[in-house]
Image: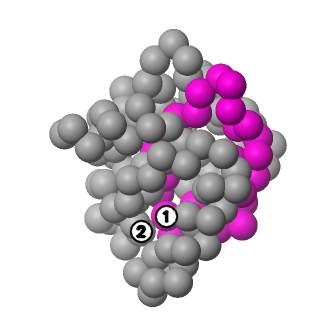
Amino acid sequence: MVLDGAHVPFNLAAVLSDLRQEEKYRAPCIAVMSIADDKDAAGLLSTMTHHDISIIFTTVGARSLSPEQLKTIADTLGLLSIVMLDPLEAYQEALAGATESGAWVLVTGSLYLVGIIRST
């Protein structure tokens, strides 16, 4: 499991590139993600199309784009995604899916989201 607050496309691309240097991060990934409404959501999600990533969209507050909006963008990019409004439930779902499939979990897109998950 990796916690990273990348919230711009360049940073997310760098994180994913760096992680792929290690064998364990070449497996499929389940991302838990929230993105603030002033961020480049399409750019962030476009970066993910170059990797084997499925996404659970969630929300962390009033500044977050709705998970449904994010799913719509992901759908147009061909990314597999679901919506879970509660960030802790989304995280638990990601962990369960990773355990079942051998994937790794990435929590990203929002420092607020990382803070919520880190405090558990």
Q: Which mark is residue 103?
A: 2
Question: In the image, 27: left or right of 67?
Answer: left
Question: In the image, 40: left or right of 66?
Answer: right
Instruction: Measuring from the top left, give residue 20's x and y in whole percent.
Output: 54, 78
Q: Which residue sits at x=58%, y=67%?
A: 16
CB contact under 8 Å: marks 2 and 1: yes
Q: Which residue sits at x=70%, y=37%?
A: 41
Q: Which residue sits at x=45%, y=86%?
A: 23
Q: Which mark is residue 76?
A: none
Please state which amino acid type lies under the numbered disc 2.
Answer: Ala
- Say whether disc 2 or disc 1 marks the residue closer to the N-terminus: 1
Q: Is residue 52 visible?
A: no
Q: Which mark is residue 29?
A: 1
Q: Is residue 64 visible?
A: yes
The colour scheme used to paint the residues is one colour
Name the quadrant of the C terminus. top left
Instruction: Measuring from the top left, give residue 69's x and y in whole percent.
Output: 68, 26
- What segment carries the magenta color? 27-53
Name the quadrant of the N terminus. bottom left
